Amino acid sequence: MVTLQPGGVYTKSQLLKELETLVSCGMFEKVDLEVKPKSDNTVGLTVSFVESVWSAAKQFKCINVGLMSQSGQVDFDQDMTEREKMDYLRKQERDYQQRVRGAKPCILPENVRGEVLGMMKKQEKVSARMLQKIRDHVQKWYHNEGFVCAQVVNFGNLNTNEVVCEVVEGDITKVEYQFQDKLGNLVEGNTQIPIIDRELPQQLRPGHIFNIGAGKQALKNINSLALFSNIEVNPRPDETKEGGIVVEIKLKELEPKSAEASIQPGGTVSFEHRNIYGLNRSIVGSVTSSNLLNPQDDLSFKLEYVHPYLDGVDDRSKNRTFKTSCFNTRKLSPVFVAGPNMDEAPPVWIDRVGFKANITESFTRQSKFTYGLVVEEITTRDETNSICTHGSRAMPSGGLSMDGPPTTLSGTGIDRMAFLQANITRDNTEFVNGAIVGDRYIFQLDQGLGIGSKNPLFNRHQLTMTKFINLNNPEKGAGKPLPAVLVLHGHYAGCVGDLPSYDAFALGGPYSVRGFTNGELGAGRNILELATELRVPVRNTHVYGFVEHGTDLGSSKDVKGNPTEFFRRVGHGTSYGAGVKLGLVRGEYIVDHNAGTGTLFFRFGERF
């Protein structure tokens, strides 16, 4: 209660104010401040008091008096008679009972109220010291639960059978948005307020009690918009409503336009226009070539337009985003690669040019559904950029066998097709002390429409399931130890109908079966991959062991030309090993169980 500290320097007015605060708090019958000068030119201060005591109480009530005028001390006019004083006290009592009835119930749970009642039953009378303990106990619960603006402001109904604890819980009265420039000066923002407002958790809106956890969630949600370089969410007292809280959100916007170029002479030119019309719409484009000054067949590009809030910013019942893109990409096919027991095969490159349009509907922050249309032209090329119609392999004579699997469905090296694509993702993963735990499920479906070369009609489907099991549930918080995690992973892919070789499912690689190169195990119409990994915390990082297995389920023969057999691959494989995470790098020693040999790998990013 006393705020004066030894060694402090105080004026007479400050000492009188301290005395007035102690006298008016209602906890003491009498308070005296005695000042004694000392020989070293300092003064000794003695605070003596007589603690207030009230009759025993058997009930405890907690009310939220936020946004209500605070009750004050009873002050009598010196000219009042005894009868007038009694009438005044009765009126004060009636007014207080009406105040209690008009107050909102507080959110203090029943078990905490029971603990307070237990404290009261242990005492014969209600004392100022006990009220202070009750105040500390109640405020501790609020602050531990994240209600950092809550405070006990008064105790009422003393000398009755029930003690009333008045709490200002921190009711939110309004939310204010402030846009700032790089120097922190207030400016007019480009982003429309409803774009930000829809990201606020319900608990951070007017009518709710401010909670620091909701503030952190709002910070995370607004940051996910990728529109701001700095975000602050702070509560402050509402100067117009006593006991109210204003949630103040300060934002520094990113530059809406950007462009980058790297030409030597090969490289990439990219540009981006974010937050068009302040509605978080964007256009992103890039062009890449080995010689931008004289681009040839290796030119690749991508132009993408993103239009969020398809149903309107104010319609919060749906959260759909429209996205369309045109693209020209080139990738090395893992289907036409040699097995471990033959010479390296000439590479086959897959060029895709086309456009894609889809809608992503977010059911929750963990679940989303994407559906749309893809139209593309696929061209297979050899290392000289010539159109390649068949895979090839080296002969013992030194020549090439050109009678390999056809590279396209049409047999001409060029396919055209249109298909519907859908994807359902449910991601319940979270980070616990820097380690990912939870589960993730992804199902993707491609449905051919019978439009294009050879009228392709097919159904491709993939299911991926990954569980990160927290084995020891350590305490959460900054500086706390990492949990031990068991990872269980499964991936199934299959195709019914027409299947061009370049779309066969490849086995082997850092994200398929570790220890093998991309496609080294084979390519099939159906595949199954299984993996398990045990991660053990050691000195703020994870050391882990793992086992992985992949199989084409005997479906390699159902791919045109059987590229698995042609390139002398086995169609299945197992690997196991151990590794350690070194920041963003994984160092792994992996044993290829098929060959019985081990290799050390260093890779960036996560396996799952």
Image (cartoon, rainbow, N blue to C red):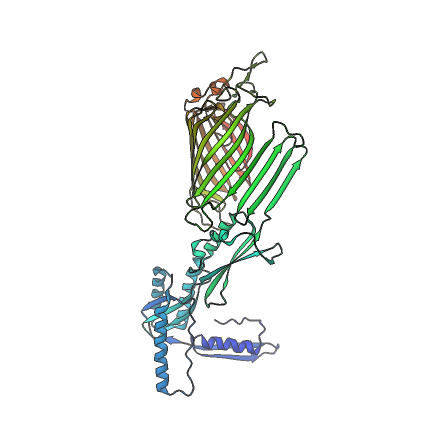
Residue at image location 56% in from the left, 45% down from the top: 274
When the figure is inspected, residue 22 is found, relative to residue 196, above or below; the finding is below
Residue 348 appears in view: no
Camera-nearest residue between 129 and 94: 94
Q: Position of residue 539 (x, y in %)?
A: 52, 44
Q: Position of residue 135 (x, y in %)?
A: 42, 67
When the figure is inspected, residue 353 is found, relative to residue 74, above or below; the finding is above
Residue 359 appears in view: yes
Camera-nearest residue between 97 and 45: 97
When the figure is inspected, residue 1 is found, relative to residue 553, above or below; the finding is below
Residue placed furthest toward the top: 397
Camera-nearest residue between 39 and 603: 603
Q: In this image, 512 relative to 166: left or right?
A: right
Q: Position of residue 217 (x, y in %)?
A: 47, 52
When the figure is inspected, residue 351 is found, relative to residue 581, above or below; the finding is above
Residue at image location 41% in from the left, 48% down from the top: 317
